[in-house]
Image (tube, rainbow, N blue to C red):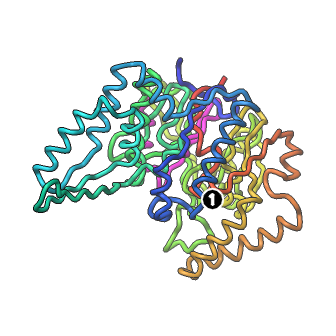
Amino acid sequence: MNARIRAEWNSLKKVVIHRPGMEMFFGLMSPYSSLYERAFSRSGARREHEILETILKTEFGVDVIRLKQAILHTASRVPIVKRELINLARETMEYTGDAGAIAKAKEEFEENIKYLDLAHFFNILIINPSLNFVVQKGTRNVQLNITKRQPLANLYFMRDQQFVTDSGIVLCRLAKPARRRETIVTKFFWEQVMGLSLLHEIDEPGTIEGGEFIPMGKFALIGQGDRTNRDAIEQLLKLEFEFSELAVVHQPMHPLIPSDKPDPMINMHLDTYFNVASSRVVVGCEMLIKNARVEIFHNEGMGTFKKDPNETNLYDYIKSKGFEIINITTLEQMSYASNFLCIKDGNILAVESERNVKNVIDNVKRIARDDPKRYEKLLDHIQADYEFLKNEGQFFPHKKDVYKMGLDVYPINIPNLTGGYGAAHCMTCALERG
């Protein structure tokens, strides 16, 4: 199988997801430090994830691959994959403290491999444990302290560790240290489990995340901002894509936040304020896309892209390509309205943004209490948005323009999963479209 995707609206055939496990429990111990938007129910999130998987399989006939299941299934049948999984787990473990106890623990690890199930080694990868040994006088008087070191609490956002282009898979180097180890797992998955080669692996100091990449047929959009730096963009501009044009979309700082103290998390990725619903319709927050500067690079072949001397903004650029734009309010944008998953041309799996708005407003109220000068304008604006949307009865995706544009929408309610800072698009790695 060749992993190649040319357009976001082509029919989704195969997708990879990850059901959040114990790593989410640790992430919820400190939601802010774990890059989550807010606290939420872990059991509720897992239940919603099961629903997401069921909808993709039964309603749309998508081949859904679960990351952990696929790794364990293959490792149980292919000795070399099992060996590599164990090696990764071995390399992940950290030991500190008494030297004798450390030597004994390492010896035990090797001796016990034959007794341990494969899930044990996968869990080591996602928990990233450190074992500290303190030995005191007496028989077997060993104090063992096990601490987690940046568990992969965001692994269920399977969009970000990589993205699939018209020429293959690009493995990302994620911007935040809290997420950077995720690609160790997904690289192992792509190469050892799926048997796929990578088109490119982003090298240091480049950083990029999959939510920044949107294929649009003859051209592709790539976001640049807090999560994606210029070095990563330069690496992409040296690859041999079939896209005739690459448009680099610069993340706009939100106009309702003071410019001397911006908050890039509000629109951290391109797909958090802009997305593609069909071959002729996109959805975006005009306040942001009109302020998103766009550089255009033309493909001259053999990994050479030439910069167009003229720049524009995302709104005008997309209009020039013949797309109609459905505008969403700031409150809808912050409630993940644009983070839908396009199933096929004109058919989208969209979050019920109305179910998220109160959580979003409450969260902004909380942070506005701590920093009113930074967030008071944003809070006033989204509260006004809420009153407007209530009076109009048009929370995305239930908007007149959606029906006018002929979109077929399947709404999904995932208020816990979105607490991690993303929705259906962020949680799915589209592997095959046709």
Q: Is residue 387 above or below residue 94?
A: below
Is residue 12 in view?
yes
Kind of residue sitting beneath label 1: Asn
Residue 129 image offset from top left, x and y in percent: 32, 50
What is the magenta range? 211-239
Judge whether residue 302 can be spotted in this image: no
The residue depicted at 35 percent of the width and 55 percent of the height is 148
Is 270 on the left-hand or right-hand side of 151?
Answer: right
| Residue 215 covered by magenta stretch | yes
Which residue carries the number 1 mark?
A: 291
- Residue 398: x, y in percent? 84, 52
Relative to 339, say whether 219 is above or below.
Answer: above
Nearest the viewer among 399 and 16 is 16
Residue 87: which quarter of the image? top left
Label 1 packing within 10 angstroms: few (<14), some (14-19), many (20+): some
On-image quarter of the C terminus:
top right
Say if the magenta span includes residue 257: no
